[in-house]
Amino acid sequence: MTPDHPLAAQVLEAAKARGVLIATAESCTGGMVAAALTDIAGSSAVMERGFITYSNAAKAQMLGVRAETLAAHGAVSEAVAREMASGALAQSAAQLAVAITGIAGPGGSGHKPEGRVCFAIARPGQPVRVEPVECGALGRA
């Protein structure tokens, strides 16, 4: 395992052992998850592709996130994370897609505070799993 990204190394090892390709769909992280994975030698065996969809237009064009979902729930929502993960799976050859959307800060609102992040995982033939996490004002890194 690499000392800089031990969790990423564990993810890669598990995916490789199962013969699973991974796709990422990132908004607030701006590609940092894909970078953590691809910083590790041998990641090409399982890293299929990454989508950086910072804008709502990119979410719609690249991942098929519906305008109705964005309008009803906003970009930082469980619904958008779900559609991002589903879209990444559909637009790739991966068997596992992870999506991340959130408010890196500074800023936020009472309803969606700084540090709110919605994670989603999609796999073929299974319901998309979504989990919102309140990380607090940890900063952009």
Image: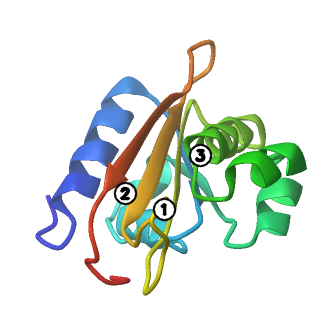
Q: Which residue is mark 1?
A: 112
* Quadrant of the rendering where the C terminus is positioned: bottom left
Q: Position of residue 57 (x, y in %)?
A: 85, 67
Residue that numbered label 2 is attached to: 42
Q: Residue at x 66, y 46 (%)?
A: 80
Foreground pick, 119 / 124: 119
Using a 10 Å C-alpha cutoff, classify the residue at mark 1 as few (fewer than 14 neighbours), some (14 to 19) or many (20 or more).
some
Q: Residue 7 shows which numbered tag? A: none
* Relative to 55, 64 lies left or right: right
Which dot, 1 or 3, sits closer to the camera? Answer: 1
State the separation of the CA atoms marked 1 and 3. Answer: 14 Å
10 Å crowding of disc 3: few (<14), some (14-19), many (20+):
many
- Report which quarter residue 90 is drawn in: top right
Q: Are the residues at dot 3 and dot 2 in contact (C-beta closer than 8 Å)? A: no
Dots 1, 2 in contact, CB < 8 A: no
Q: Who is closer to the viewer here, 34 or 65?
A: 65
Q: Is residue 45 above or below residue 8?
A: above
Q: CA distance from mark 1 to mark 2?
A: 38 Å
User: What's the residue type where badge 1 is placed?
Assistant: Lys
Q: Position of residue 56 (x, y in %)?
A: 78, 65
Q: Nearer the viewer, mark 1 or mark 2?
A: 1
- What type is the residue that disc 3 sits on? Ala
Image depth: mark 3 or mark 2 in front: 3
As helix, strand or loop, the secondary structure at mark 3 comes to helix
Q: CA distance from mark 3 to mark 2?
A: 28 Å
Mark nearer the N terminus (1 vs 3): 3
Which label was assigned to residue 81? 3
Instruction: Name the N-terminal-most of marks 1 and 2.
Output: 2
**Residue 126 as seen in the image, left or right of residue 86:** left
Task: Examine the rendered structure and indicate whether residue 55 appears above or below residue 23.
Answer: below
